[in-house]
Amino acid sequence: MRRIDLITQACDPKTLTVGQLMQDALFTCTAQTDALTIGRLMTKQNFGGLPVVAEDSSLVGLVTEYDLLQAMIEGRDLRKVFASEIMTTQPLAARENMTLEEVANLFQDRYVTRLPVVRGKQLVGIVARRDLLHGYMKASAYWS
């Protein structure tokens, strides 16, 4: 669920933060999860990317549709490919206190569609471009 769905009072869209916009009900995998399992989860849940976490929930990587497609193009058996082999290590991440404008600029400047959200090194959510638009529209409906 998007946290913005819980906003019940007027909110200036310019004051929205990633903490309000992010999705905090997360699906994750570990570095040892096989690519076939990741692909099945991503297609079933309609995700474009899956955060990779360590035992302590710290973010260690991100597997995206691109990573899975690249492994398929290379003819690799997804049952034998692990997240650690295809993930982006040290992925770009957002912080909860970033504003809508800051994260929107990050999306535009870095050509990404989703970002893990971290508190320190701990994964606490994920925010997508769609979440920004959804949050802005929801807040704007109340702000006049």
Image (cartoon, helix red, strand yellow):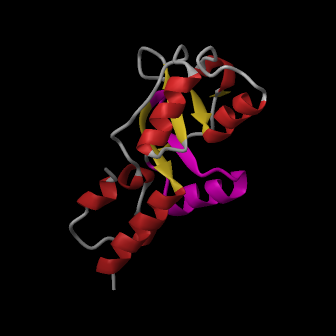
Q: Where is residue 8 in the image (x, y as percent from the top left)?
A: 21, 66
Please, is residue 66 above or below residue 3 in the view? above
Question: Which image quarter holds the C terminus?
Answer: bottom left
Query: Most extreme residue toward the bottom, as rendered?
Result: 144
Depth order, front residue of 144/22: 22
Instruction: Give the residue at x 59% y 52%.
Output: 113
Depth order, front residue of 129/76: 76
Question: Total marks drawn?
Answer: 0
Please indicate, yes or no, whether residue 119 appears anywhere in the rendered image.
no
Instruction: Give the residue at x 54% y 32%.
Output: 39
| Residue 132 is inside the magenta segment | no
Depth order, front residue of 47/139: 47
Query: Most extreme residue toward the left, as rendered?
Result: 8
Q: Position of residue 4 (x, y in %)?
A: 32, 59
Please, is residue 49 above or below residue 15 in the view? above
Q: Give the range drawn in magenta.
A: 97-122
Q: In which quarter of the image is residue 85?
A: top right
Q: Quadrant of residue 134?
A: bottom left
Please indicate, yes or no, whether residue 135 appears anywhere in the rendered image.
yes
Instruction: Give the residue at x 51% y 39%.
Output: 116
Depth order, front residue of 118/43: 43
Instruction: Give the residue at x 40% y 73%.
Output: 137
| Residue 110 is inside the magenta segment | yes
Q: Position of residue 74 (x, y in %)?
A: 78, 27
Q: Position of residue 99 (x, y in %)?
A: 49, 58
